Image (tube, helix red, strand yellow):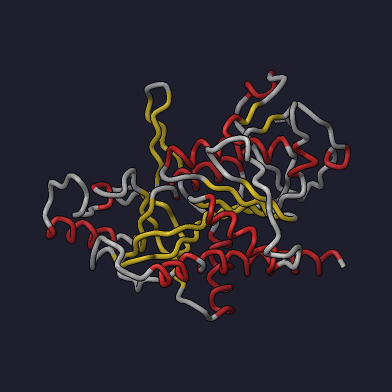
Amino acid sequence: MAPGPGFSDEKNETLCESESTVYVHNPHLDGMKDDILYHFNLGTSTHNLPAMFGDVKFVCVGGSPWRMKSFIEYIAGELSLEDPKAEYPNICAGTDRYAMYKIGPVLSVSHGMGIPSIAIMLHELIKLLYHARCTDVTIFRIGTSGGLGLEPGTVVVTKQSVDATFLPRLEQVILGNTVVRSTDLDQGLAEELLQCSMDLGQFETVIGNTMCTMDFYEGQARLDGAFCSYTEKDKQDYLTKAYESGVRNIEMESSVFAAMCKLSGLKAAVVCVTLLDRQKGDQLISSHEVLHSYQQRPQILVGHLIKKMLQTSASSRS
C-alpha cells in the first residue's frame, strides 16, 4: 500500500530497495482522508507523523507506563543521547490508555495487560510506523513472566509463542469465523540477544517457547485465584507437559505480538524475565528490591543490543 494520508515528507519519498518497510493489510485505509489513532491521541491530519517518528528504528513495548518511561531513561543514558534524569514528555499525554516516549531512533510504548490491550495498541502503532514511513524497524516486547524449570531472574528470549495447548498459533474470531495466525518470531534476532547476554555476563538467559494465556489465574494453572476446579496434581501434570513441550515461561501478550509483527514485516523479539518458578509456587515472595532488579534485566539486554546495532550501522556508513 502507498503511504497514508496527511503531511508529506520529501526525504522519505524515495526508499532504498534494501530497506524493509512496515506493511499494513487494509485497502480501506487508502480511502480515508484522516486516520485517527484514537488511543494514542494522534492522527494523520493533526500531527506530522513522518517528522515526529520517521527516524524510528527501534520500538520497545511493555506492560506498564512506568516501565516504559524507565526504559527510555535507561536507553538515553546508554546511547549518550540526553541526560537520563531529563524529563521525557509522554507523547500520548492526551489519553490515559497508553504512554509513549521517544529519544533519537528509539520509541518506547506501554501496552497494558493481556492480548486485547496489546492488540489495540499494536494496530495503532503499526499504522503510526506506516504513516511515518519508517523503515528497517526492529521491535521488542520486554516484560515479566512465570518461569518453568528456571531459577527466578532468568531471562527468556522467546523462540515461539504457543497457546495453552502448546501449539504455535493465535486463534482469533473475525466476523464469526476462526482465523489462525502464525506466532513465529525472528530466530536470528533471538540468537543475537542470547549472544549479547553472554557478552554482558550479568544474568542467565535462555531461548525457549513462551506460553501465552488469556488469564493470569486459571489459564495459567494457578491455585490461588477466586475460582479453582483442579488439584495440585492436576496443575503439576499440566505444567510438566508444558515444560516437556519446550515451554520455559508463561505470560499473556506474546502470541498476538508475534502474529501482528509477522504480518506487518517487523523484525520482532520477546524478552521476559521470570519472577518465579511456577512448578514451585504461584505467589511472588521475593522482596521488592529483588523483583525490581529482575525487571531491569530485559531492558539491560535489549539496550545492549540496540547500542550494538547502532554502532554496527554507524561503522558500515563510515
Q: Nearer the viewer, residue 220 or 93?
A: 93
Q: Nearer the viewer, residue 312 or 232?
A: 232
Q: Nearer the viewer, residue 93 or 259?
A: 93
Question: Which of the 4 quarters of the picture holds residue 43?
Answer: top right
Residue at the (80%, 66%) spot, across then down: 314
Residue 126, position as x, y percentages in the image: 62, 39
Residue 8, position as x, y percentages in the image: 83, 32
Q: Is residue 259 above or below residue 29?
A: below
The reply, left or right, for residue 289 in relation to residue 108 is left
Residue at the (41%, 32%) spot, across then down: 179
Image quadrant in which the N terminus is located: top right
Question: Which of the 4 quarters of the picture holds residue 35?
Answer: top right
Image quadrant in which the C terminus is located: bottom right
Residue at the (63%, 23%) spot, across then down: 27
Residue 114, position as x, y percentages in the image: 41, 44
Residue at the (37%, 65%) spot, across then down: 275
Residue 259, position as x, y percentages in the image: 49, 43
